[in-house]
Image: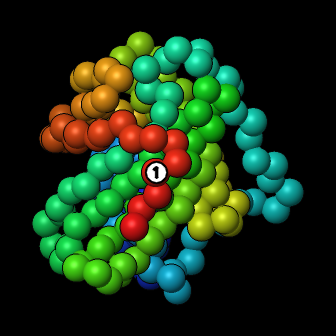
Amino acid sequence: MSGAVLFGVVKVGRIIRASLVFALIGLLTACGLPRHKDAPVIQAPAGAVEPACAPLSATNQLVGTWYLVSKQAGVAGEMQTLLTLTADGKLKLQTRVKQGRNIRSELRESGCWEAPAGKLITRVSRSNGELVDFNDPIYVTTYIVEKVDANRLVYRQDRADSKPAFAKKVQDSFRLM
């Protein structure tokens, strides 16, 4: 996440994954669906080495842990997204579909992020602990950062029909319940 999720059929999975990444972040937003526990991921090619992340300034306003709760059409329950962006350029993204007290599905992704001039770019390299084909475009998402301050992040996917997502900054120790 941005993270995109494979959901049984690869074609449907790519659409869902794109939605997740849009959600993030659906990596700060929450407009995507986590991968079904039995769905395959796009595996990294044999011999692939996980990319190194480029450090950012520790004073970058995006550094921190961001929490987003949203609803998505066609999804029963709420989407909860927890995005952690660290100054060393690493990201962690946890997205969960929760209906009442029940957690219907969950996705944990990690990778790298960068923030060139008013944008946030996420590059997922692991999905639920598995190394993915991080060169596949479904694992890269670009967001336009509309506003960021010490408490709130407003961003949207870098495409014409995207809607803003609102994330709240939380303590680094915050966990999804």
Residue 140: give x, y in percent of width and height: 50, 43
Horizontal side of 140 relative to 21 (left or right) equals right
Residue placed under numbered mark 1 in the picture: 174
Kind of residue at disc 1: Phe
Residue at 59% over, 15% down: 57
Horizontal side of 10 relative to 18 (left or right) equals right
> Could you tell me how many numbered marks the image carries?
1
Q: Quadrant of residue 34?
A: bottom left
Residue at 52% over, 48% down: 173
Q: Quadrant of the C terminus?
A: bottom left
Horizontal side of 83 relative to 52 (left or right) equals left
Residue sitting nearer the eye, 75 or 148: 148
Tell me if residue 162 comes above or below residue 116 in the rendering.
Answer: below
Residue 102: give x, y in percent of width and height: 32, 83
Near mark 1 (Cα within 10 A), the count class, few <14, some 14-19 or many ≥20, is few
Residue sitting nearer the eye, 24 or 78: 78
Question: Residue placed farthest to the right in the image?
Answer: 47
